[in-house]
Image (cartoon, helix red, strand yellow):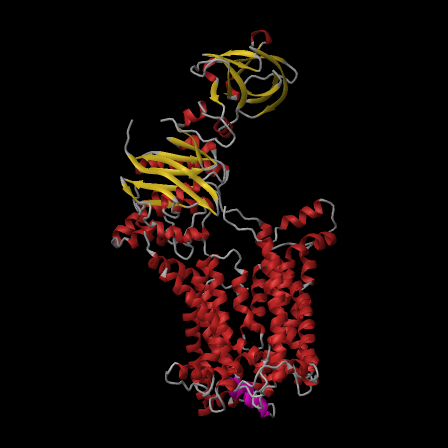
Amino acid sequence: MNDNKLINLVNITKSYDNTVILDDLSLYVRENEFVTLLGPSGCGKTTTLRIIGGFETPDKGQVVFEGKDITKLPPNERQLNTVFQKYALFNHMTIAENIAFGLKIKKKSGDYIKDKIKYALKLVNLDGYENRMPNSLSGGQQQRIAIARAIVNEPKVLLLDEPLGALDLKLRQDMQYELIRLKNELGITFVYVTHDQEEALTMSDTIVVMNQGYIQQIGTPEKIYNEPENAFVADFIGDSNIIAATMVEDRLVNILGANFPCVDDGFGKQKPVDVVIRPEDIDLVKPSEGILTGRVTSLIFKGVHYEMEVMAGGREWLVHSTDLCAVGTEVGIKVDPFDIQIMNKPASEDEQAVVPGE
Amino acid sequence: MVKNFFKRFYIGIILLFLYAPIIILIILSFNKSKSRAKWGGFTLKWYAELFQNDDIMRALYTTLILAFVSALIATIIGTAGAFAINAMKKTPRVIMLGITNIPMLNADIVTGISLMLLFVALRFSLGFTSVLLAHITFNIPYVLLSVMPKLKQLNPNTFEAAQDLGASPFYAFFKVILPDIFPGIISGYFLAFTMSLDDFVITYFTKGPEINTLSTKIYTEVRKGIKPEIYALSTIMFTAILLLLIIANRKSGEKNIPLRK
Amino acid sequence: MNDTKPKHNPLLERGLMLPNANRMKLFSFPYILWMAGFIIIPLIMILFYGMTTSENRFTFANLAMIAEPINYKALALALLLSIISTVICLILAYPLSIILNNIKMKSNSLIIFIIILPMWMNFLLRTIAWQNILERTGILNTLLTFLHLPTLNIINTPAAIILGMVYNYLPFMILPIYNVLIKIDQDVVNAARDLGANSLQTFIKIIFPLSLPGVISGITMVFVPSLTTFAISSILGGSKIVLMGNVIEQQFTLGNWHTGSGLSLVLMIFVLLCMAILSKYDKEAEGSSIW
């Protein structure tokens, strides 16, 4: 594995007014990676980004960039640029002046700046907007100007703080593709903060799931989705059935009284665990063919699939299927062994933190 | 560290500058000597004599009534005006706001003189009523400009929601809109009250010879020497306001929750 | 690439539409009548008096009175002193506002409270108190003598008037600047730092330009009353120093209403001129106020 750590956060701790926001957080970002910090509000993801950007100083720990400790370096001396949540454009300047800001500070030549503005506006599909004022632009356009303003400085890393949070759904989806395209064209590292799991799954190379100041899991989108390491991750990423179960032996788990074959081993015998089963991984079959039997209690049409709730083994199972089963139908539940994800139960309520698997 | 010390020092100097005259006035109110120039020992007699002094008590009474009534009428007219202007289209709104700004930006002396000329031309004798009309005039803009921002922040849907839930427009207005903008109305009233209390120039030109407010009374006494009772009165008023505002600040302070996450 | 237009909520655009807009407009009648009767008509009265003789004949003579040496000297001195006071207020108030903004109090109402509290003591009395401080044997000189420093004799000089102006109007400079500074989005400042600007560059290119509306309304609120005052100059300037406000006040006490109105018109023209120059820098035209 490429071990070129561009940014390395080492044992970062940060608290405000006696509230711990980040507790001993360690994380690294590889060169040219698209890393997303994902979590609910208040999980510490924005604080982490602001520590990388230099707007906050950690109470403890180090920020290492290209092997150099930059913990105490002010933001203007860091080779990173930030795209702020609410754009933070300079409303008293034209679009061109906004984009030129960083370049003028670096005393680049007039021609160079002019070329760069043209290039950046083209890149974000806003050619010809040089002399407009930020206030006359729509939210999506302002967002793209904020990105243009950051990337003309050719930063090694672009930090993005929920940049699409204020946009509506359609525009947000367009901008997601736009950002992926930009990243590929520029070939720079992106560190992206969002609370939107779909956004994270769509764009990232690596997702860092955070909650309450701790990293819950680090992995590729597929890994995070298919193999959540704990109930929080499973619950936060997509819909899922999280069920308390017992590991009977290697490759066999007892869920609500029925034994399901699975592919995990090494948990021990008769060990309490949590299992995660994605709603689309549940097959509804004839009662005689199922491992568990139940009855459909609700049915909603969702466009690409039907969403059903099935009462089986004493609890509601959420099922997504393209096949319709009417309310009241007796059904059998079957799950392929590799679709059952087994997780250790957290030792206590407090200790939700998980040591990230490398 | 040095930087922090300098910052505090600077704030301290400015506050000393702003409060030095007030400290002196408070000290003078306890000065036995009638002369401002020397300290004759501590006394409370000016506080006792203050209430015997009809002249000062009458001026105080006029000042307070004037402030109370003018602020009240200005609040009613100004609030109604704010609603109306807020509902206007852009061009008339800008014109109306421009007119509103005239008495705020115009020199007090010009406002005072122009009103005096108007009263005289209408053969309206100068006295309490003319001063009252003048005070209402310069108070209205302060009320209007306090209420307008609150109206702008108002979510139009709340009014519709109230009606949707079955309230009559009238009921919705008094139960939903008015409570929402009430802080603006209150601060407008207090602002107007203060401005009226502290006004000298406009009162000076519109009052006529019959009446005096505290301001005009003090002005006529500048040359002959201020009566020490006035220092006592100002000290009382200042302390009363200080206490009132501290209590108000405490109360609103309790509601303040730190914004940081 | 297609993009949605900025969202317009028609209700918010128009302002709140209460029961119905026409009924709302009825509310404006007392206001409009009042403003017309007590602001517009009185201004026309000044214009009328200023442009006529006591026989109601049209004349420019009242305006021409400004050419009298005593009058134009008073105007020139008033302009000079008020400009100096305004500049001093700006120099004192801006750093103070920045420091106050950096303190980041939980509630800024306390700061505003401390700044405006002195205004609750009558301004004439406070100005008189400065006599006590500045007099030949006043507090300041007693202190200076005690420290074996040379004494200052500034009472009844233009310097004392400037001090009085700065003292009385400083809060009107501090409040609008402070109010603008606290509203600047911290992320805009962060963005400038992020793009490589150091503290000084951030101040010059971002913070100062964004605070201009506050600076301008502060300048107006200090300059206009300073230019037109007659109370401060008569209390701290003695009888020898005459400002434009004193000239106009004398004309009215002497009964020369036409001359007084003419000179008021001249004063108004100067105020308007200065504000016109200032408003060029102020893009936020609609209802900029300190409150």
Q: Is residue A111 visible?
A: yes
Residue C158 occupies which quadrant of the picture?
Answer: bottom left
Secondary structure predominantly adopted by residues drawn in magenta: helix
Q: Tell me what residue is drawn at x 63 percent, y 78 percent.
A: B233
Residue C171 percent location from the top left of the image: 50, 70
Q: Which quadrant would the N terminus of chain C be assigned to in this image?
A: top left
Q: Which quadrant would the C terminus of chain C be assigned to in this image?
A: bottom right
Residue C187 percent location from the top left of the image: 42, 50
Question: Compared to C227, does B258 lie above or below?
Answer: above
Residue C247 falls inside the magenta stretch: yes
| Residue interval drawn in magenta | C244-263
Front residue of this view, candidates B64 and A301: B64
Q: Is residue A100 visible?
A: no
Front residue of this view, candidates A62 and A175: A62
Residue C198 percent location from the top left of the image: 32, 55
Front residue of this view, candidates C14 and C172: C172
> In this rendering, would C90 be left or right of A290?
left
